[in-house]
Amino acid sequence: MRNEKSNGFELTSDRISKYKEEGYLLFPSFLSQDEVQECQKRIGNYIQKIVPEIPGTEVFYEDKNDDSSLKQLQRMHEHDPWFHQLFNGKPKQLAQELLGNDVITKNLQYFNKPPKIGAATPPHQDGFYFKLDSPRALTMWLALNNTDEENGCVRYVTGSHLKGMREHSLTGTLGFSQGISDYGNEDDRLNEVPVPASKGDLIVHDSLTIHLAGKNLSENRPRRAIGFIFYSSDAKENSLEINEYKENLKSQQSGKI
Ligand SMILES: O=C(O)CCC(=O)C(=O)O
């Protein structure tokens, strides 16, 4: 039985089977409390020093005239060597183990849902955005705060990654431009589960696993996370579809960023 505890995460064959069956897997205490605090500090520094220097396509607000409504930072590893290093450490080792291959570090994102301002995340499959000819990819979601249903923890549809790609259509939500058009059938409702996470926990999901999240309805509880996207190095991006998608995205983002 494999056991990768020496890397700071436990990956037994039972856990790999659970991931393959359910399409997501929680790694409690993937980062220590000190490591989470360091991430928070580096994000604060990034917002102060790097955000003013980078294009609007890398920084999304719920309201672009209100800095306190910051909702997403994109490709942080391309703008700050600290995040590049974070991406290439333990998360990359875990991605290699789960995908059984070398991986491409595609995107490191920050997700922030400020209390009462943070909008819902529409149901979607990341693979729809990736446009890979074979969707061998995964996403990790690292909780920087304790999250539960009140402040909008991530919800997964167990086993949905085994049922193919669903149709997506425009959502009007900045950062999640496409959502599953007919979400909410009986199978979706039966299998949708909230996955609360504690500060430092990591959740990994397959690129076909349907997931969504509610608004942050709390009075004053932050809900911040880092997302890591990895592609298997043998997955091919469909450049025609990507170009078409980017063109669509430009028109949807126009006026919002
Ligand atoms: O933070 C969220 O609400 C959603 C994150 C997400 O969709 C993802 O990591 O793929």
Image (tube, rainbow, N blue to C red):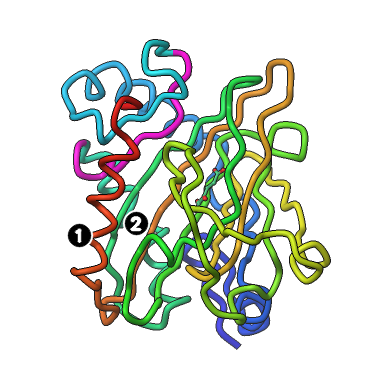
Q: Quadrant of the C terminus?
A: top left
Residue that mark 2 sits on:
89
Residues 184 and 230: in front is 184
Residue 64: quadrant of the picture: top left
Vertical relation: 140 (above or below) 100: above
The stretch of residues the image draws in magenta is: 68-79
Dot label at residue 13: none
Residue 151 relative to residue 241: left or right: right
In front of the other: label 2 or label 1? 1
Q: Earlier in the sequence, mark 2 or mark 1?
A: 2
Amino acid at pointer 2:
Gly
Secondary structure found at label 1: helix
Residues 147 and 185: in front is 185
Residue that mark 1 sits on:
243
Residue 241 lies, in percent from the top left, at: 26, 67
Amino acid at pointer 1:
Asn
Residue 60 relative to residue 213: left or right: left
Residue 71 lies, in percent from the top left, at: 46, 29
Residue 128 lies, in percent from the top left, at: 43, 65
Secondary structure found at label 2: loop
Residue 149 lies, in percent from the top left, at: 77, 39
